[in-house]
Amino acid sequence: MDQIVESAIFCLGLFIGMLIMLNIGQRIGAREVANDPKSARAGTGTIEAAVFGLLGLLIAFSFSGAVSRFDARRQMIVQETNAIGTAYLRLDLLPANVQPALRETFRRYVESRLEVYRKLPDVQAATAELTNSTKLQQQIWKQAVAACQAEEASSAARMLLISALNEMIDIDTARTLAFKVHPPLIIFGMLFLVALASALMAGYGMAGSKSRKWLHVICFALIIAFTVFVILDIEYPRLGMIRVNAFDQALVELRETMN
């Protein structure tokens, strides 16, 4: 299922669940107030503050972590572009007769790297293209090692090109892993349950009102649900509405300079 649809279903369920819990909380509170008007809410303020504080912390840490990982993924695109560009420039250190084949493999490799992320959110297609990128990466390594071992290759070529290729391979691995790094699902489950508990407490606190404050009820549930949706969308920047695709333009421009 598409990530946007999954996030929307999760947050819609949270919104509806909070409305239900608000209603249940208000009914329970109204019943207790009717039975014991003076002490029905005695001592509940501390518990309510603790639950709302926990909800605030969960949202704050989840949002902060999602934004941090989002920024890290954008930085990795820049780092990969720089690493590939440096390695490509250092091909000039190799003997002229081996450069054309390596440059062509580099062009195919950059195009493959772009295709990996263009094919998302189709994860299967992106995974297949990632396998192709890995094969091209291995081909570049073998060609470069063979060229550096040639008699006419300089020692500078061996040292500078191999180190640049190592960095290029390392950042590729880091980007692949960063795409898979997310908080444990239990964190989102806990956020869901604490939000429902907060709604129950909020409904209980509204029990003293004779009329139901629908504006406040709907706004409270909607704001929490929408905030969680934004967190999920930032957490999956290749699959949701918030994207890092604009930063891929750096790789596109690098590919054009290779022509």
Image: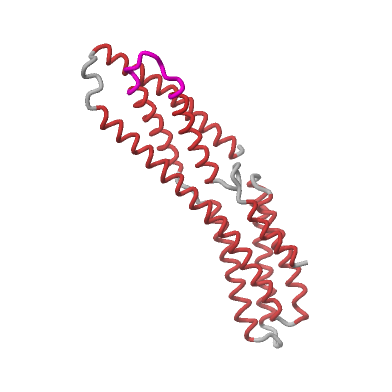
Q: Is residue 107 above or below residue 224?
A: below
Q: Which residue is found at the position 71% from the left and 87% from the top? A: 152
Q: Is residue 176 above or below residue 143?
A: above
Measured from the top left, where is residue 151 in percent x and y? 70, 88
The residue at 41%/32% (across/down) is 195
Q: Dividing the image into 4 quarters, which one contains the N terminus?
A: top right
Indicate how the structure is coloured in the image. secondary structure
Q: Quadrant of residue 57?
A: top left
Asked whether, in this view, residue 52 is left or right of residue 43, the answer is right
Question: What is the span of residues highlighted in magenta in the rendered image?
Answer: 205-216
Res. 35 image quadrant: top left
- The secondary structure that most of the magenta stretch takes on is loop
| Rendered residue at 65%/67% (across/down) | 84
Q: Residue at x 58, y 69 (%)?
A: 167
Residue 43 sits above or below residue 158 on the image? above
In the image, residue 206 lies in the stretch drawn in magenta: yes
**x, y percentage for residue 3?**
58, 40
- Front-most of 161 and 143? 161
Q: Quadrant of residue 106?
A: bottom right
Residue 221 on image: x %, y %: 46, 28
Q: Left or right? Give the position of 217 relative to 176.
A: left
Q: Position of residue 114 (x, y in %)?
A: 68, 56
Q: Indicate whether residue 81 is drawn in magenta.
A: no
Foreground of the two, 179 or 216:
216
Left or right: where 232 falls relative to 81: left
